[in-house]
Image (cartoon, rainbow, N blue to C red):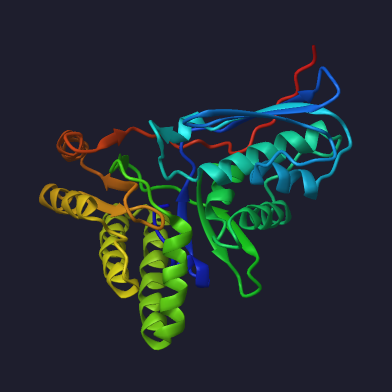
Amino acid sequence: MVLGEYAVLNGAPALVLAVDRYCRATIGPSEDEICHFASLTNTDEAVDFSADAGSGYAVVDEVLQSLPNTGIWQGVLDSRELFAASMKLGLGSSAAALTAWAGAWAVFSGRERLRADPRTLETLIGLHQATQAGAGSGVDVAASLSGGVIRFQLNESSFPEVSTVQLPEGVGFVGIFARSAASTPDFLARYEAWRAAEAEEARALHAVLAEIAENGIGSASADDAQGFLEAITEYGRCLEYLGVCIGAHIVTPEHRELMKAAERLGIAYKVSGAGGGDFGLAFSADAAALESFKRAADIECDVFEFGIDPSGLIVETVSE
């Protein structure tokens, strides 16, 4: 997530990248009389169960309840690319897993292929929220389904609206993993509690965040690299202030040091997503400065070179 954290929950636009890290789902008929499911993450787990029972995995079972099928099947959900050692990278792994599983299951159960349209997105967001106690805007689901660089916004009816955006020409980016996991539901709960308790202050800060996000997305669309980079830096600073408001380290000490290093090199840097420790993003139109920042960050953090995946969900049918 590049711009729009937290504010997107209240109707502000967000800018989201679909990066080239993948979750893969494989489904086929079972070779015996029971269902088999394997989950591959930082650990490997497998369960066997009857067709009328659940797998015990929320992402899988929400899809099966939404698109029921009485057949006996076996499947694998492989999210290992979205983990590092024992931790999630903070790249929307559960959203990618749900989207991949829903796409494969729809075809396996004899339905039409899922399309990257608003109604499908709304359905998938609802399923994903059901696995997270109703939390989340759906931006990560939209990136998983649509691919590319997208502008995401919830309209007045909370219906998702998505359009394609291009990053300004010459602007590169890199991901920085601070080697600590974060709890998005906990941070969102703190944010909602603060909004309820400090409604006037929350409205004022939301207006600022929404304006920065809108300006940054507009700059990207206008190929204005300087305006885009300034919006990233400004949004990052506002997220740090929001953390103070809600009583949580949206910007952890590790990310604060990265922000200082980025500032010295003229790099635009901010935490990505709900914050709390995992991922940050650095953007620059100066390739040499970005390389210097990567070398500095690599001492204490993990540097990830990402490309943008243009396709989103892809479903392939294999006949034996």
**Residue 10 rendering spot, x and y as whole percentages:** 51, 72
Quadrant in the picture for the C terminus = top right
In this rendering, does residue 119 appear at all?
A: yes
Residue in the image at 53% along x and 37% along y: 310
Residue in the image at 40% along x and 47% along y: 167
Residue in the image at 32% along x and 47% along y: 281
Q: Nearer the viewer, residue 38 or 96?
A: 38
In this view, 229 is above or below 192 = above
Q: Is residue 5 left or right of residue 289?
A: right
Give the farthest residue toward the left. Answer: 264
Q: Nearer the viewer, residue 245 or 116?
A: 245
In this rendering, does residue 26 appear at all?
A: no
**Residue 92 rendering spot, x and y as whole percentages:** 50, 46
Q: Is residue 312 left or right of residue 206?
A: right
Q: Please tell me in which quadrant of the rendered image residue 76 appears.
A: top right
Residue in the image at 44% along x and 66% along y: 6
**Residue 251 rendering spot, x and y as whole percentages:** 27, 58
In this view, 72 is above or below 208 = above
Q: Nearer the viewer, residue 85 or 262?
A: 85
Q: Is residue 169 left or right of residue 133?
A: left
**Residue 290 rendering spot, x and y as whole percentages:** 21, 39
Q: Please tell me in which quadrant of the rendered image residue 198 appears.
A: bottom left
Give the farthest residue toward the right. Answer: 70
In this view, 138 is above or below 155 = above
Q: Is residue 254 left or right of residue 279?
A: left
Mark count: 0
Give the farthest residue toward the bottom. Answer: 200
